[in-house]
Image (spheres, grey):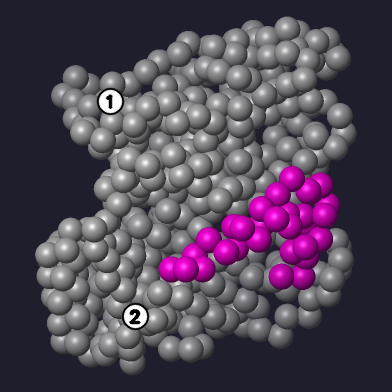
Amino acid sequence: MSQPPRSSSPIDWRQVSGLLQDIVGPEHVLADPDSIDRYSADALTPYRAYYADAAFDRLADVIVRPADTEEVSRVVTFAQKRAIPVIPYGGGTGVMGGILPVDGGIILDVGRLNRLLDVDPSSMIAEAQAGMVLQDLYDGLKPYGLMPGHDPYSVPIATVAGTISTNGVGYRAAAFGPMGDQVVALEVVLPDGRIIETRPVPKQSTGPDLNHLFIGSEGVFGVITRATIKVFRQPEANAYATMEFADFADGFAAVAEMAALGIKPTLLDLTEDDEGILLHLLFEGYREGVDAALKRTTAICKTAGGWSVGPEPTLDYWRHRHDSALNYRETVLGRPRAERWRRQWGRTFDYLHMSLPTNRVLEYRQRADEMLAARRIHVVEYCLWSRPEFFSMLIVPDGDRRVDGRDGYDADVRANLAAGVDEVLTLAQDMGGVMEYCHGVGIKLHHLLERELGASRGAMQDIKRALDPAGILNPGKLAL
């Protein structure tokens, strides 16, 4: 997007920091080198960024930690008048580089907006501030006998607004949908500082639903400060099941039949790896519904050629679903960028999440296999997660010659992996799908987004110009 030119005059960041301190208080404006370094990256490493290496060269100029929506509005208004970039920041745990300050500027950390404001058990909704960590939301709802519907691996570290901004998919998405489906209302600070609130009702017929302008938009149209979300009763019954299949296509047929009948387990994960092909299932809810869904699903899987291997594999899967985030919180979160990156140098792999029309998934898998095999890239895991349309692959290069160290990886291996990733992602686009259903686009896949959006990119640019004429909010994201 062509933005109005920023001022050619250099910004006096000492003066800017002083003025920001007047808004949020001196202790909540950070400009020391350690804080700048720590805030200027998320969980995406330069290795996996492939074509966006330069995005890691720019650091933020200052960190601001507002206490409430009014302070967020004042910071954004301040920045808009001076054409200073503002990057909304939640937990800093995204895996696509969505918060990288590619033009520098202000990182706006909403971590102090972290309270559960209201719970309405009769309406089955809860109101939470943007920076509330999902685990705290779970804990806050427990006394009411309620729970959120969004349960990603990152529950211990991700925030409410972060998961809305990327429209994340979690382990309970088969039953409750992605995070965006669970949004009832939002409070948002627009790029000019105005505060808008949508109404907490399930439907309207008075124009477009503005919630969807901000769901999955990675903070380019506004700063989410508060969300009203659907919540759900803690289940009175649950049932775990694990079905095994001799062929992925058989498991796919079972999953597609479940979807066609409207059977919605809490967890649905069909995974093929070196250990076989397993369909992990969890049913939750009222007792009679759980029993009926499990019985019918078991029959569907057997008709498709599957057989039960008992609940234990899925029980183990469910118990450990948050382990990687807990480990990340303990060993990585808050560490300097270089230290975070060193922990992952040499790990030559990628995890891809494509969404395709159901009738194209198996054909896509075959064609992607051929493309990757030609590049000596091996798929170590195939997965359907939550829906038959959501298809994922974990890939690694064959004969990887990696070594440890910041610049010690094999550049040829990395370049080949990058080219293979682009080939299979653009294949998904050409087959009527999209290249990412789970984590947002960030800077990692930014170079392919214009191709995917097509003519609709122009409409998005028009919206961006209208709301953010100086282009200050999270520049360099969503091809805007």
Q: Which mark is residue 200?
A: 1
Q: Is residue 276 magenta?
A: no
Expressed as whole percent of the image width and height from the top left, the position of residue 173 reads 34, 56
Q: Quadrant of the N terminus?
A: top right
Q: Is residue 338 magenta?
A: yes
Task: Count the marks.
Answer: 2
Q: Quadrant of residue 179?
A: top left
Q: Which mark is residue 77?
A: none
Residue displayed at 82% across by 54% down: 339
- Label 2 sits on residue: 311
Which residues are the magenta region? 318-347
Of label 2 and label 1, which has the lower sequence position? 1
Provide the secondary structure element on which disc 1 rests.
loop
Expressed as whole percent of the image width and height from the top left, the position of residue 141 reads 39, 41
Instruction: Tell me: residue 71, above or below residue 322.
Output: above
Q: CA distance from mark 2 to mark 1?
A: 39 Å
Q: Does the image show residue 219?
A: no
Residue displayed at 74% across by 45% down: 334
